Image: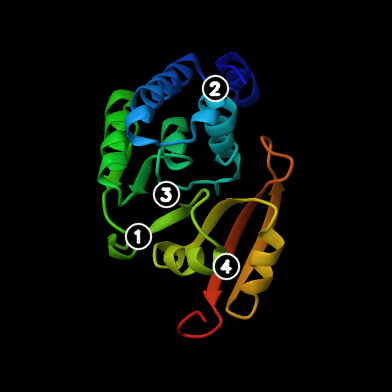
Amino acid sequence: MTSEQFQSAFGVSRETLDRLSAYAALLAKWNPAINLVSKTTLGDVWGRHLADSAQLFPLLPEGARTLVDLGSGAGFPGLVLAILGVPEVHLVESDVRKAAFLREVARVTGAPATVHAVRIEAAPAIPADVVTARALADLADLLPWAHRFLNPGGVCLFPKGRTVGDELTRIGDSWTMRVERFPSRTDAESTILRLSDIAPSSPRGS
């Protein structure tokens, strides 16, 4: 996917496209030293990373203002969603070098993002309307982490691969929630989960 194809697919302004282009340029510059993403995906950064993140934006609840992105890595999807217009984004990334990259992208693009260079368990319990995580962990691990941040009525958006059905089955006795599935626009074998009304079935969520 090219930047022009991205703009056509998502209807972003020229200014937003320029900010995302600056992001892509920084990723290419920093990646050899830090290994932010697989080298094989850098040739299609607009499709594999930027579009893959941007497709979550229409799934955000109306009026959502605060988003926490767990295990942000190179900033996907949280930093992309900040550039697209989420008013307040918190990026939780324990790797200090990756955190430095995230801060530089936020500075250059003017994204409303705060970077927390700590482990997820040690991050402040920021009240969030939305929690995201991409390629981070199984739902059995994600839900306890995410639940600590979610406002009442908040949602989780988790891109998932072919094992999504198995993951949902494994947590069936531990959590109650509303599950919505959306086909990925960038990978025919992937699904985006939108989870709401999340609650542990027992006090410990297990």
Residue mark closest to the camera, 3 vs 1: 1
Query: Would you name the residue on which mark 3 appears?
Result: 67
Residue 32 sits in which quadrant? top left
Q: Position of residue 104 (x, y in %)?
A: 27, 30
Q: Residue at x 49, y 46 (%)?
A: 63
Separation of residues labelled 4 and 3 (CA atoms): 17 Å
Q: Is residue 2 above or below residue 129?
A: above
Q: Of the residues shown, which amino acid type is indicated by label 2? A: Gly
How crowded is the residue under tag 2: few (<14 C-alpha within 10 Å), some, or many (20+)?
Answer: few
Asked which quadrant contains residue 185, the reply is: top right
User: What residue is disc 1 on?
Assistant: 120
Residue 33 in the image: state x and y as whole percent.
32, 31
Q: Earlier in the sequence, mark 2 or mark 4?
A: 2
Q: Which residue is mark 2?
A: 43
Q: Quadrant of the N terminus?
A: top right
How far is mark 4 from mark 1, CA to CA? 22 Å
- Secondary structure type for disc 3: strand
**Residue identifier under label 4:** 197
